[in-house]
Image (tube, helix red, strand yellow):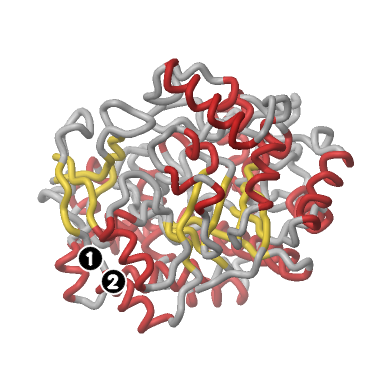
Amino acid sequence: MSFARAAGLLLHPTSLPGHGGIGDFGPDAHRFVQWLADAGMKIWQVLPLGPTGYGDSPYQCFSAFAGNPLLIHVPGYQVPEGPPEHTVDFGAVIPAKQAALAAWLDTLPFDHAMQQFVHEQPWLPEYALFMALKQAHGGVAWTQWEAGARERDAASLASWRQQLAPAIERTYKEQYVFFTQFHALRHACRDRGIRLMGDVPIYVAHDSAEVWANPSQFLLHPGGTLKVQAGVPPDYFSQTGQLWGNPLYDWERMHADGYRWWIERMRASLQLYDLVRLDHFRGFEAFWEVPGDAPTAVHGRWVKGPGATLFQALTDALGSLPIIAENLGLITHEVESLREQFGYPGMAILQFAFDGQDSNFMPHRYGRDLVVYTGTHDNDTTVGWWQSTGEGDSTRSAEAVAREKALARRYLDTDGAEMHWTLIRATLASVADTVLIPMQDVLGLGSDARMNLPGRQAGNWGFRFTWAQLTPAITGRLRELTATYER
């Protein structure tokens, strides 16, 4: 599927300003949509919006279908002692926001609209029970619950549903409010010509409602522990690879039932987003399988994925899909053939163009059917990348970094004084149909504003900006560039 020439911003809603210690779907989100339109942006890309667990990562959620309650705007709620403006203190925010949200939800009647919403969400009863059981078991993973709940014994679950009815109903209310506020924000985007772009991770968290409710769809031992797990081999970010800890799918079983679970997952995503970035696309052609008890991802193996059979099933069920394939990393001819077979645009990262490993990221090699980023949520900011010495943020050596910078100066004809604007201009000027820029690069922020460092266990996902940073001069400069390059 081809896309109209456009530019957009990458910003997760938790990074929005506001008085609650974390960005949400309230007035600041609607103000941001208006700012996007004023700056000439046509796309707002967000990270996965699911309820986050350990490490606060949006790529490790308790559900692939539910919404993160931390993103709900609670009317009148604000952190009393003034939270830090430029970061989310998850340790302080989560209990305070959860308490305020619970108190507000208790004032809302479980009316007909909520009941109708529950009826229309086939995933919701299982998710609400999962979260209630998790709370009843002190927050531990489902593999550590009492046997009846863990093994999904029918009589045991019936008893738990009755016992946990108030908590289950509160989750129903929570999800109703989440999606009501989300759809109001999406309508605001549509009214201003902004397309909303979501992110669908290839894998789901082990400790999630989907794995607990559908264990036969995953490669698990009896009792739910991992036979094998997902990851990637040693790469740019880590010499020992990345060990993700997600369960791998039983693709043979999924194929046998017509990929029912995946069809429902994609159907739900298309009800939320205009465009979908499909994360780790190469894993659908072949994936890195690591033993379930392995300490690193080094000793894994490549295993063939479902390939075209999955995407044909999705197309047959849902029609032509507005998918962007995240085809980064070790990409083979087979991966690119699969992407091209279904007409999914791939990605290019301009920060990666100068390391001598993949010249296809050079702008003069771009095709039109491409989505180009200065950097993604996994990269350092452009200012941080330019100031880097290569130690601690990647597997690059100091000598490699020096060569990279020398090539970037020659190629971009720059002294590096405003490298973030230099890269922004280069992407916008390219022939690629779609350009996406992280907010950190628009603001010219350094490494302390980085969203995520792959492999780092803590300190990620906390970036926030303030309205004071987003000056009229920055807005005007971005608007002028998008107009100049006909985006």
> Residue at the location (44% across, 82% down)?
319
In the rendered image, which quarter is residue 6 located in? bottom right
Q: Position of residue 465 (x, y in %)?
A: 72, 35
Provide the secondary structure element on which disc 2 rests.
helix
Q: Looking at the picture, does residue 181 appear above or below residue 280?
A: below
Judged from this view, the residue extending furthest toward the left is 222
Residue at 22%, 57% in the rendered image: 249
Secondary element at image label 1: loop
Residue named by callout 1 = 306
| Residue 376 in the image: above or below residue 248 | above
Q: Nearer the viewer, residue 131 or 217?
A: 217
Q: Residue at x 40, y 48 (%)?
A: 328
- Residue 254 placed where, x, y %? 21, 69
Q: Is residue 128 visible?
A: no
- What amino acid type should be assigned to the residue bearing mark 2? Leu
The correct choice, above or below, for 325 with respect to 247 in the image is below
Q: Nearer the viewer, residue 220 or 467?
A: 467
Horizontal arrangement in the rendering, residue 6 relative to residue 331 (left or right): right
**Front-most of residues 455 and 476:** 476
Residue 84 in view in this figure:
yes
Cα–Cα gap, marks 1 and 2: 6 Å
User: What residue is at 72 percent from the left and 61 percent from the top?
Assistant: 487
Please, what is the three-letter code of the amino acid marked with disc 1?
Answer: Pro
Classify mark 2: residues with Cα within 10 Å, few (<14), some (14-19) or many (20+): some
Disc 1 and disc 2 in contact, CB within 8 angstroms: yes
Residue under circle 2? 310
Q: Which quarter of the figure has residue 152?
A: bottom left
- The percent coordinates of residue 220 (x first, y second) are 15, 51
- Outermost residue, right side: 472
Counting from the top left corner in percent of width and height, residue 314 is at 36, 76
